[in-house]
Image (cartoon, rainbow, N blue to C red):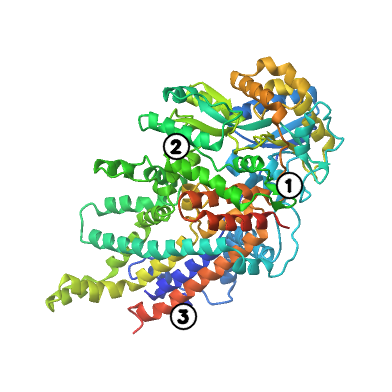
Amino acid sequence: MVDSLSLKPEAAAPAHAPAVKRGRGRPRPPRGSLRSRREAWAAHLFLVPWFLGLFLITIGPIVASLYLSFTDYSLLDEAKWVGLDNYITLFTEDPRFWTSLKVTTIYVVVSVPLQLGFALGLALLLDRGLRGLSFYRSIYYLPSLLGGSVAIAILWRKIFGADGLVNAVLAIFGIQGTSYVNNPDTALGTLILLHVWTFGAPMVIFLAGLRQIPGSYYEAASIDGAGTLQQFKSITLPLLTPIIFFNLVLEVIKSFQSFTQSFIVSNGTGGPTDSTLFYTLYLYTKGFKDYEMGYASALAWVLVVIIAGLTGVNFLASKYWVFYGDSK
Amino acid sequence: MRSLKTVALLAAAALTLTACGGGDEGGTADGKVKLRFSYWGSDARQKLTEQAIAAFEKKNPNIDVVGEFSDWPSYYESLATKVAANDAPDVMTLEIRGLAEYAGRGALADLTGKVNVADLDQQVLATGSFDGKQYAIPTGVNVFAMFVNKPVFDKSGEKLPDDTSWTWDDYIKLSEKITKAGDGTTFGTEYTFNQVYLSMFAAQRGEKFYDNGKIGVTPETIKAWWANFDQLIKTKGSPDAAKMAEIAAAGVEQSLIGTNKGAMGMWWSNQLGTLAKVSGSELQMLRLPKAEGASTHGMFLQPAMHWTISSKTERSAEAQKFVDFLVNDPEATGILLSDRGLPINSKVLASVKDKLPPADQQILTFVESVKSELAQAEVPPKGGSKMEDIVRRYSEAVTSGQQSPDEAATKFLEEANAAIAG
């Protein structure tokens, strides 16, 4: 873990990236020289706006929310210190907390592997030297840009509504469907589908990863008589594991924080009957609708711990299945 | 490749901790006293309100009223954020559900003796008080009633019920008959989980929704109420649960009555104009059905909204003047008419009566005909703004078959009581 954190320019850039040239091409002035100090000063100056933003609208609120999570802050009056009350209530007396956690977990556990599998499958197809690759890549990437948007969520409501597109198609075959977004058994499924549909971003990353696998490996393998499946299992998959890992970590975190889809598709209620009550939606409801901002802050911190924990587990587990070419 | 791990780690850290923030804008005053006034609604309401503001500024040239307008879904979120940032508008529009939330937390100024309320309906005015203080002045009133889409109803060949005596059973059977008489695309009724429906249903059985800091509705009453929906769905008097949820979420314009696909439905009276307009049909208002042997329909006049003044304002005198203008000045009501409910100032109402559009005339006639039966509206306690969501959630669970009525009733009372405790 530790050595992976050291950011050497040589190590940070893939073989063909221009960054390598920049890192090697310019001689570094010795440490402590006038020039280096002036450069450092200029660098800090340019970083000021970013730091201001980081401290004022990111770190500041984060620290404030940690404090608020120990208060009964209601938005409308002063915050009173209540110690661990919010956290205790959350774990012992709040069934909706568990509901939202369950819903979100199902969403993540089902949709992320599906989405990544789909992305990998398409990336493999597109990687076979298809004509007009960049066109397909753009088309498939589009849902990733749109998937989190309000417009698409509204479109989803229409497609899976009682008189929506899905039922119109089913009607051709004489099947009478229900309103999928308003049925507690199917509502979450429509959101999972929406998430899988946004497979474009991981697909593009997979494509880039596939491009980095040297063609000579495959040549050698085919000379040795390995079939397509064997090649995929023994070359593509192992060499792609860092990419899979990267996508997995990112998507798990992103989907744990999903909000817009459930907010719009359920009209802000998490309904029907809490079947689409995402964790962040519950947090939002508590803070802004029920005037329990202190409690909502506690929810936020529990989410931070959950995601950090999951990411930690992900990193630990990665030792056993992720193969880095340079670490033999 | 190893570097990817680093990038993943950094991205993970950044994604985990990032949240979104919002902005706020200020304004300037040119020697005038600037008064900020927040309200929600449609474009039409915004236009009317701007006209009323202009009329007020003409009479009070030293005051500049700045309307802070937002749509309904985001209204409370943005208002609460402003209050939290010590940036509360001087005059705020709230609903009855928001009253205890804001007044109970010291966000509202006591208006007792500050605004002239002599000509207002005193029973309705009482709904603006909390802990014995007049924190809010009602803008106007609505009444919850059964709407009938006449053309759809008449097509079924059924006779309009006598609304002084019809029972819930009558209503359910009638709905079934109307659906059966139709061609499969129309329904007898659409239903609603509106909390006021449950309140009135409970009142008919002698129970109050809020009773001394607790939920006064018994499990039997809630189950009887849910049984109504169940019956309607089973007999096809109404669409099924999923379809109904979709209709309810789509809003007034997409309702069955509004689209001429349903004969009956329960609504607040201020929706009559919209529904009449979108359906193009003649609508009629009826009293809600009654429980067997009940002595009352449980009807009451609900304030549509409340005018309130922030407790932090430095412009109390001007804010009071503005609220006074809105409720007592015939010119203001002449512009706003019944957009925020039927005016409760008897003198002002008399002066604008003839100017009211047909739908409002109809509401006025209905309200006058039931006047002697009206009870007092309840002011929900602190935490009451959660109730609409709680009622809807458990009702959905029961109608969609996710929970048994027994289980849901127990859990509902548990959660509802917890919401208003402390």
Per the image, the residue denoted by label 3 is: A1
Q: Residues within 10 Å of mark 1 (few under 14, many from 20)?
A: many
Indicate the amino acid at tag 2. Answer: Gly
Asked whether the beta carbons under mark 3 and mark 1 sit within 8 Å of each other, the answer is no
**Coordinates of residue A101 in the picture (x, y in percent):** 51, 64
Which quadrant of the rendered structure holds the C terminus of chain B?
bottom right
Circle nearer the viewer, 1 or 2 = 2
Res. B100 mark = 1
Crowding at label 2, few (<14), some or many (≥20) Cα neighbours within 10 Å?
Answer: many
Q: Which residue is mark 2?
A: B237
Judge whether residue A205 can be spotted in this image: no
Q: Tag 1: residue type? A: Ala
> Position of A220 compared to B251: left or right?
left
C-alpha separation, residue under disc 1 versus residue under disc 2? 38 Å
Chain under callout 1: B
Q: Nearer the viewer, residue A62 or B349?
A: B349
Alpha carbon distance from label 2 to label 3: 65 Å
Q: Is residue B169 above or below residue B414?
A: above
Question: Position of B136 compared to A17: left or right?
Answer: right
Q: Say which of A213 and A260 sits in front.
A: A260
Residue B109 placement (x, y as % from top left): 81, 43
Camera-nearest label, 2 or 3: 2
Q: Name the amino acid, label 3.
A: Met
Describe the element under mark 1 as helix, strand or loop: helix
Q: Are marks 2 and 3 in contact (CB under 8 Å)?
A: no
**Quadrant in the rendering for residue B97:** top right
**Chain letter of the residue carrying label 2:** B
Seen at 62% across and 22% down, the residue is: B360
Residue at x 48%, y 52% (from the top left corner): A262
Q: Nearer the viewer, mark 3 or mark 1?
A: 1
- Do the residues at pointers 3 and 1 share their chain? no
Q: CA gap, disc 3 to disc 1?
A: 54 Å
